[in-house]
Image (tube, rainbow, N blue to C red):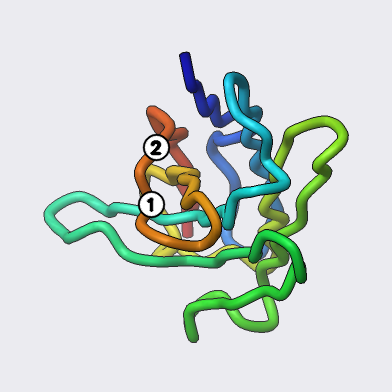
Amino acid sequence: QVQLVESGGGLVQSGGSLRLSCAASGLSLSRYTMGWFRQAPGKEREFVASIAWGTGSTRYADSAKGRFAISRDNAKNTVALQMNSLKPEDTAVYYCAGALFGREYTYWGQGTQVTVSS
């Protein structure tokens, strides 16, 4: 059974930092492109960052560039999202997701809440 479990969310002041972690079980992370997405109240879910299987190349939404960093540890089957210089508009539920060989994101975690106060 595949599971993705996010952790590390919480309440932080504007300008602060949080590190989100996604622990995977039931799959080998090395074969998956892993992504972070977020959904704010009343808005659609949006892409935040991804890290490709194989090459490890990264991609970021414009809103995350220069502030967020995605990383992976295939040996530990974990993916992390380091978020710095947080803004109130970063407030959302953050989800990690996995796409086998970079195809469709088929596995999703339950999400972790990030709240940034002004």
Q: Residue at x 43, y 36 (%)?
A: 113
Q: Position of residue 69 (x, y in %)?
A: 72, 66
Pick the front one: 7 or 54: 54
Secondary-structure class at tag 2: strand
Pick the front one: 23 or 11: 23
Q: Is residue 48 left or right of residue 59?
A: left
Is 54 drawn above or below residue 22 in the view shown?
below
The residue at the far left in this view is 42
Within 10 Å of the Cα at label 2, are there few (<14), some (14-19), or many (20+) other Cα atoms?
many
* Quarter-of-image position of residue 83: bottom right
Residue type highlighted by circle 2: Trp
* Quarter-of-image position of residue 66: bottom right
Q: Mark number for residue 72?
A: none
Pick the front one: 74 or 87: 74
Q: Residue at x 37, y 43 (%)?
A: 93
The residue at the far right in this view is 75
Q: In the rendered image, which residue does mark 1 sit on?
A: 105
Q: Residue at x 55, y 31 (%)?
A: 6
Q: Mark number for residue 108?
A: 2
Q: Is residue 65 left or right of residue 43?
A: right
Is 33 drawn above or below residue 12 in the view shown?
below
Q: Position of residue 23 (x, y in %)?
A: 65, 28
Q: Position of residue 70 (x, y in %)?
A: 70, 61
Within 10 Å of the Cα at label 1, are there few (<14), some (14-19), or many (20+) other Cα atoms?
some
Residue type highlighted by circle 1: Tyr
Distance between the alpha carbons at the discs numbered 1 and 2: 8 Å
> Contact, CB < 8 Å: mark 1 with mark 2?
yes
Secondary-structure class at tag 1: strand
Q: Residue at x 72, y 46 (%)?
A: 30
